[in-house]
C-alpha cells in the first residue's frame, strides 16, 4: 500500500504518521547524522588546509624574493643634464648590478631608417610600372596593373624587415613610405632591378658615371672618339634630346630642368682630382622609337644612385628678346620681354627682389638698372653673398636655362620654403613685374630618417648599439636613451636598494606570522585542525628553517644577528636598524644569510615540501580529505536510502494495522446487531 495513504487512525484513534516520523527521526539521528557531521567536519578541515596552502604559497614567494642575488636589488639614480635640465637617459638596475658611479655621455640616439617615394596623383590607380627591386635582399615584384596601395601590400607581405605605408598629400594623392622595423645603422637596403623600378617609384635617383668636366662636351670629358648620335631619353616624366658631342653635363642638366624635370651636377673627389656626375630625379630610360637612345644612356653610364634629397626650385616666366629668341645670360635687361609683352625696363628703373630662403627667412634687396646690365647682372645680384640668396646659412642659386627661365634652387635639398618675386618700380613711380614665379620642382627628402646606431660613452669608453635600450653598457643595468647631448656627461649612481631589501624582509616576516597566527587559531579545542600532528610538523619545519646557521659567514651567521628573532609567542620580529646596519657593513654576508645556501632557500624548500602537488603534506591532506568525503557521502546516501525504505515499511505496516482495525470494528458491529436481534425474538 502506498505511503500516501491516510494512516491517520480514524478507526484506531492512533496518529500513525507521527509515530512514523518519530521513528525515522530517531533512526536518522543514529545512522545518518553522525555521517553528515563527519562530512561537515571534513569540509571545515579542507577549508583550513586550503587557507594554510595559500599562506604557505605567499611565504614561498617572499622567501624566493629574499634569497635572490642582490637582496632587495639595486637602484640607479640618473640626474638631469646640468646644462639644459633635460633627462638624457633612464636606468634600471638588475640583481646583477654592482654599486658604484659611472660617467655617461649620450652622443647619439638610434633611429629607424625611413625612405619616401615620389608623389603619386592617385594611390589607387594602376601605376603602369612593371619589374622588380629588392628590399633588404627580398625581391618585390610589381605588375603594370598594381596601384601604389597594391605595391604597399606586396611589400608588407614580403617580410623584408620593413613596413610600407602611404602618406596622404590630400585627396587621392600620396607617397609610398618604407620604414625599417628596427633601428640601427643597417637601415634599409634598396637594390634596383634592371627596369629601374625603385627609381620609377622615386626611392632612388639616377647618376651618370663620374667624368672629368661638367662644362666641356660630355664626349670630350669622357675621352670618347666614337660616341652615339644625338638622341631622346626619358628622365623621370620628361623627354629631352641630348648630344654628347656638343653638350656638357651642365647643359644636359639645364635641358632637363627646362623640361620640368629635376637635375643637377654634383662633384666628388677622385684621388687627387675632382670628377662630376649628372644626378637626376627618377629613372632614366630609352625611347623605343629612337635607336640611339639606349647607347647614349649607356655611354653616360646612368645607374641607380642614392636615396638623396631633391632640391626645391622656383622658376620665372620665360624671358625672350624682341626677336623672340630665348634670353641668355648676356641678354640686356632693357630688351627683355615676357611672352609677347615687353617688360618696359629702362635705365634707372629698380628691380625689387623679394622672397624667403629655404628656412623661411625673408629676403629683400634690389637692383637699379644700368645701361649695360644683362641677365647675368640680375643673376649675380640674386646670388649675392652679402645680402642676396647667396648669403647666410641657407643659400640658394639662380641660373637661366635654355628656355629663357630663371631658376632659383635651394642649395639644401629637401623640404623648403624657398620663394621669389621680381617686381619693378619705374623711375616715374609706376610699378610692374617680370612675370609670375612658379614652383617647378617641389623639394623633398627621399631619406626621411637615416638609420643610425645609438652612441654612448661610459667612463670614456665609446660604444655603438642599434637600439636606444642598452643592456650591456653598464653591467647589470638596463639603460634607455632619451636624448642626445654631446659634451655633457652625467654621473649615474648605482647603489643598493636598502628600502627594497627592508621591505622584502618585512614581507617575509608578515607571511611567516600569518602562518603562526593560523597555527594558534587551530590550537583551540573546536578548531578544524585541533591537535593535528601534520599541521604541527609543517609549522615546526618553518621554525627550524628560521634557525638555520650559515657558518661560512664571519659576523652574520643567524637571523637573530641580522635583526630577525622570534618573540615569546613565536611571532617573528624585525629590528630594522640592526638589519640596515648589517646590510651596510657586510652586504655579502647578509645576502649569503638569506640566499641560496641560507634561510631563503631553507624556506623555499620547506614550503615546497608542504605544498608540492601529490607529495606535499598539505596536498596529501587535501587529497585524503577529498577521498574521505566522497566515501562518507556515499555512506550518507546509502543510509538515507535505507531510511526511505524503512519509512515505506512502517507506513505499510501501520496501514495494514489500521485496515485490520476497520474490519474488526465492522465485525463487532455485525455481531452486536445479531445479538440484539436474537434478544428481541426471545421476548
Image (cartoon, rainbow, N blue to C red):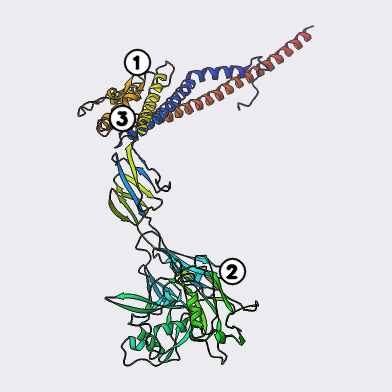
Q: Is residue 285 visible?
A: no
Residue depth check, mark 1 versus mark 3: number of the one nearer the observer: 1
The answer for how far apart the CA atoms under marks 2 and 3 are is 69 Å
Residue depth check, mark 2 versus mark 1: number of the one nearer the observer: 2
Residue at point 38% right, 59% down? Answer: 183
Residue 600, percent across and down? 30, 31
First in sequence: mark 2 vs mark 1: 2
Q: Which residue in the structure is indicated by mark 2?
A: 171
The residue lying toward the viewer, choosing from 73 and 434, is 434
Residue, far right: 683
Is the residue under label 3 in contact with that under label 2 (CB below 8 Å)? Answer: no
Residue 75, percent across and down? 35, 39
Q: Is residue 661 visible?
A: yes
Residue 123, percent across and down? 53, 71
The answer for how far apart the CA atoms under marks 1 and 3 are is 21 Å
Residue 1's quadrant in the figure? top right
Residue 117's mark?
A: none
Q: Which residue in the structure is indicated by mark 3?
A: 603
Dot 3, how many residues are within 10 Å of its Cα: few (below 14), some (14-19), or many (20+)?
many
The answer for how far apart the CA atoms under marks 2 and 1 are is 82 Å
Residue at point 48% right, 84% down? Answer: 329
The residue lying toward the viewer, choosing from 474 and 616, is 474
Amino acid at each position: 500500500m502506498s505511503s500516501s495513504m491516510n494512516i491517520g487512525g480514524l478507526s484506531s484513534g492512533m496518529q500513525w504518521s507521527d509515530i512514523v516520523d518519530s521513528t525515522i527521526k530517531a533512526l536518522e539521528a543514529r545512522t545518518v547524522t553522525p555521517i553528515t557531521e563527519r562530512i561537515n567536519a571534513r569540509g571545515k578541515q579542507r577549508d583550513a588546509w586550503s587557507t594554510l596552502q595559500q599562506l604557505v604559497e605567499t611565504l614561498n614567494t617572499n622567501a624566493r624574493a629574499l634569497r635572490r642575488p642582490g637582496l632587495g636589488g639595486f637602484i640607479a639614480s640618473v640626474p638631469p643634464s646640468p646644462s639644459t635640465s633635460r633627462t638624457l637617459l633612464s636606468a634600471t638596475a638588475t640583481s646583477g648590478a654592482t654599486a658604484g658611479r659611472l660617467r655617461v655621455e649620450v652622443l647619439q640616439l638610434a633611429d629607424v631608417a625611413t625612405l619616401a617615394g615620389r608623389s603619386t596623383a592617385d594611390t589607387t590607380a594602376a601605376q603602369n610600372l612593371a619589374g622588380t627591386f629588392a628590399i633588404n635582399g627580398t625581391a618585390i615584384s610589381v605588375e603594370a596593373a598594381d596601384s601604389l596601395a597594391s605595391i604597399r601590400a606586396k611589400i608588407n607581405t614580403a617580410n623584408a624587415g620593413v613596413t610600407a605605408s602611404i602618406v596622404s598629400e590630400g585627396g587621392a594623392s600620396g607617397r609610398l613610405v618604407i620604414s625599417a622595423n628596427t633601428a640601427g645603422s643597417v637601415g634599409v637596403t634598396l637594390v634596383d632591378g634592371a627596369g629601374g623600378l625603385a627609381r620609377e617609384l622615386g626611392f632612388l635617383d639616377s647618376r651618370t658615371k663620374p667624368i672629368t668636366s661638367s662644362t666641356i662636351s660630355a664626349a670630350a670629358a669622357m675621352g670618347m672618339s666614337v660616341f652615339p648620335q644625338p638622341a631622346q631619353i626619358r628622365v623621370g616624366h620628361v623627354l629631352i634630346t641630348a648630344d654628347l658631342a656638343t653638350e656638357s653635363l651642365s647643359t644636359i642638366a639645364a635641358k632637363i630642368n627646362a623640361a620640368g624635370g629635376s637635375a643637377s651636377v654634383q662633384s666628388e673627389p677622385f684621388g687627387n682630382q675632382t670628377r662630376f656626375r649628372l644626378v637626376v630625379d627618377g629613372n632614366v630610360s630609352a625611347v623605343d622609337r629612337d635607336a640611339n637612345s639606349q647607347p647614349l644612356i649607356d655611354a653616360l653610364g646612368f645607374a641607380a644612385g642614392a636615396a638623396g634629397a631633391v632640391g626645391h626650385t622656383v622658376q620665372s616666366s620665360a624671358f625672350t628678346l624682341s626677336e623672340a629668341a630665348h634670353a641668355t645670360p648676356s641678354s640686356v635687361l632693357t630688351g627683355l620681354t615676357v611672352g609677347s609683352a615687353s617688360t618696359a625696363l629702362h635705365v634707372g628703373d629698380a628691380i625689387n627682389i623679394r622672397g624667403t630662403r629655404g628656412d623661411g627667412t625673408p629676403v629683400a634687396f634690389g637692383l637699379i638698372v644700368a645701361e649695360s646690365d644683362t641677365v647675368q647682372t640680375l643673376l649675380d645680384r640674386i646670388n649675392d653673398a652679402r645680402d642676396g640668396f647667396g648669403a647666410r646659412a641657407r643659400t640658394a642659386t639662380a641660373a637661366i636655362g635654355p628656355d629663357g627661365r630663371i631658376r632659383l634652387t635651394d642649395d639644401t635639398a629637401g623640404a623648403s620654403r624657398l620663394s621669389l618675386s621680381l617686381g619693378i618700380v619705374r623711375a616715374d613711380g609706376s610699378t610692374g613685374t617680370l612675370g609670375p614665379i612658379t614652383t617647378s620642382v617641389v623639394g623633398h627628402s627621399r631619406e626621411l630618417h637615416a638609420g643610425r646606431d645609438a652612441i654612448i660613452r661610459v667612463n670614456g669608453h665609446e660604444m655603438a648599439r642599434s637600439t636606444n635600450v642598452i643592456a650591456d653598457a653598464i653591467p647589470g643595468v638596463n639603460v634607455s636613451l632619451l636624448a642626445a647631448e654631446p659634451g655633457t656627461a652625467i654621473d649615474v649612481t648605482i647603489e643598493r636598494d636598502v628600502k627594497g631589501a627592508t621591505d622584502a624582509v618585512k614581507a617575509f616576516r608578515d607571511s611567516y606570522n600569518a602562518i603562526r597566527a593560523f597555527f594558534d587559531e587551530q590550537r583551540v579545542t573546536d578548531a578544524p585542525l585541533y591537535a593535528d600532528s601534520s599541521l604541527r610538523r609543517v609549522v615546526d619545519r618553518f621554525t627550524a628553517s628560521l634557525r638555520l646557521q650559515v657558518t661560512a659567514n664571519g659576523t652574520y651567521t643567524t637571523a637573530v644577528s641580522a635583526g630577525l628573532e622570534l618573540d615569546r609567542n613565536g611571532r617573528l620580529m624585525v629590528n630594522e636598524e640592526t638589519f640596515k646596519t648589517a646590510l651596510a657593513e657586510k652586504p655579502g654576508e647578509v645576502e649569503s644569510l638569506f640566499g641560496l645556501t641560507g634561510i631563503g632557500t631553507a624556506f623555499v624548500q620547506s614550503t615546497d615540501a608542504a605544498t608540492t602537488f601529490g607529495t606535499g603534506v598539505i596536498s596529501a591532506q587535501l587529497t585524503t580529505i577529498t577521498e574521505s568525503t566522497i566515501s562518507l557521502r556515499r555512506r550518507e546516501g546509502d543510509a538515507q536510502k535505507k531510511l526511505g525504505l524503512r519509512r515505506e515499511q512502517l507506513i505499510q505496516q501501520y496501514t495494514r494495522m489500521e485496515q485490520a482495525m476497520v474490519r474488526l470494528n465492522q465485525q463487532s458491529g455485525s455481531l452486536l446487531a445479531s445479538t440484539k436481534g436474537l434478544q428481541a425474538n426471545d421476548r
